[in-house]
Image: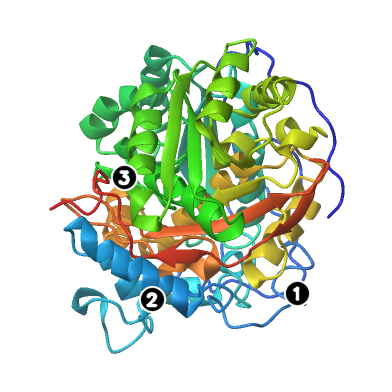
Amino acid sequence: MATRGLARSLIALTASVALLAGCGGSAIDTAADPGLPMADTSTTGTDVAAGTDTAAVPEAAGEDTTTPGSATTPGDAPASAATADKTVASTTGKAPGAGAAAAAGSSGAGSAAGKTATMSAVEKLVATAPIFGGNGPCKPATLSPVAIGNVSTLSGVIGELMSPVRSGLETFVASQNACGGLNGHRIELFIGDDQGDPATASARVQELIQTKKIMAFVGHIQVLTVDAIVPIINKYKIPVIGSDLTSNTWFTNPLMFPMGSGIQSTAYGYIKAAVDYFKVKNIGQLWCLEVPRACEQHDRAFKELAPMLGATVKKTIQVSITAPSYVQECLAMKNAGVEAIGLTFDAASQHRVARSCAQVGFFPKVMPYPLGVGNEKQFLQGNKWLGNAYVSMNHFPWFMNDTPALKYWHASINKFNPGFTNGGAAVMGWSSGALLVAASAGLSAENPTTQQLLDTLWTFKGQKWTTLGGLTPPLTFVKNGNPRVPYCLWTGISNADNTGWASGTSKPTCTDLIAPSDPQYKK
């Protein structure tokens, strides 16, 4: 892998709300390459709206004609591991992995409600659209614009960590508007910065709904502020499609549609990394004070799942990301006999932990939290204590490029947004956008509505196509209940010098194991 650039620690930003329209205001090409794959627009019409910017699809996109979805099949883990996970799951007292088990054996038909004699509109879209790795036709969106919003933490103490979501969404909008938009409708994207403040978050969400007539929100990164927006979302019945996945809140509201596994899955990933990859069983975790609910949910699942996987939790400690030193915590972990440690907080704090632990001669195996590498420049700084770190990702690794959908992702970056700061936050924006595209299969040519998006999303019942060409786990959404997403994880392993990525996986490994405290499978 190419060596990534270096960056310094987190900086405080003071930017106020930033509103984006369309493709970031930049002029782009006005004709699609006729020799490239084209999205199916048979129901969208052909008139070009006055003043609409259009652009060609990335030249490299869609050239691989591999069957969409074949890049990722849930359950691709070695048979022995899958069997062990299912056996352990039965000890939890819950029905093991309803979503994962169904998805692993699905041929695309799914539940009886989603089974039809012919392919549904959303299934056809996922099978053909380039964003999902399909080789269907692609031409610029021509129908009336649809307003989509995003409110994320883009400034403040963790704003730099989350900021790549903006670039991920901007790239998605430019690319998708060049390739069919939302069922023919051009996307207009408006972004608000909540500055990590709950009151600002709710105000920004309400402002975009009222002034921009937002049809849906997409890809919110709000680890500090998500609970503040729930009353607004519920009041106006506007969904949030895709999120940061760090809180149970995203999995306990029918108007929120996560595009990946929840926070319990990353606790599972820590333990699997320790036991199966590093071959150690004595584990520990440092977890964040500033996001108490989400981090406590992670710590609880960590303690619940460890004995099920043959590991022993030696110690967990709650810490503040503003602490200048973690020497005492490193000594406590060392004295407790911790061999592998999870770091559940931001990259800047991970580097301070590294320096502190090195001072006291504590060199465990390291498992960083996936959103802790949301901005990879903050993580890949040449700190050897973080070398060979194992990141269990509940989103696809942005640096992998060996499936049709991932090739399209890279081709879109190269064409529309080369050189932006990449990382997990950017991927979350892109995969949230992909879920939005799938949801748009039911949008009408005239008078598209939020309800049409919701009706399509509620047909997701863990069918094979709900992996969106390998960009997501199998997704199940329930009209009046909690979404269900099995624990499906990709991996990224940093090189020994912590300057780049040594390896990664483009296919997730899924399990039926469920943490007893996980809310998503509760009736």
Asked whether, in this view, residue 481 is left or right of residue 42, the answer is left
Residue 322 vs 301, above or below: the answer is above
Q: Are marks 3 and 2 in contact (CB under 8 Å)?
A: no
The picture quadrant where one finds residue 169 is top right
**Residue that numbered label 1 is attached to:** 34
Element assignment for label 2: helix
Instruction: Name the amino acid, label 1.
Output: Pro
Q: Residue at x 56, y 67 (%)?
A: 132
Q: Are marks 1 and 2 in contact (CB under 8 Å)?
A: no
Tell me the number on the disc at residue 290: none
- Which corner quadrant holds the N terminus? bottom right
**Residue that numbered label 2 is attached to:** 104
Instruction: Name the amino acid, label 2.
Output: Ala
Is residue 268 in view?
yes
Is residue 240 in view?
no
Q: Of marks 3 and 2, which one's residue comes earlier in the chain? A: 2
Q: Please name which of the two marks, 1 or 3, marks the residue nearer to the observer.
A: 3
Residue 33 vs 353, above or below: the answer is below
Mark 1 Cα within 10 Å, few/some/many (few <14, many 20+)?
Answer: few
The picture quadrant where one finds residue 406 is bottom right
Q: Of marks 1 and 3, which one's residue comes earlier in the chain? A: 1
Residue 163 vs 416, above or below: the answer is above
The picture quadrant where one finds residue 191 is top right
Q: Residue at x 28, y 26 (%)?
A: 232
Is 87 in front, or is 32? Answer: 87
**Residue that numbered label 3 is attached to:** 304
Asked whether, in this view, residue 445 is left or right of residue 329, the answer is left
Is 189 in front, or is 479? Answer: 479
Element assignment for label 3: helix
Q: Position of residue 456 (x, y in %)?
A: 31, 62
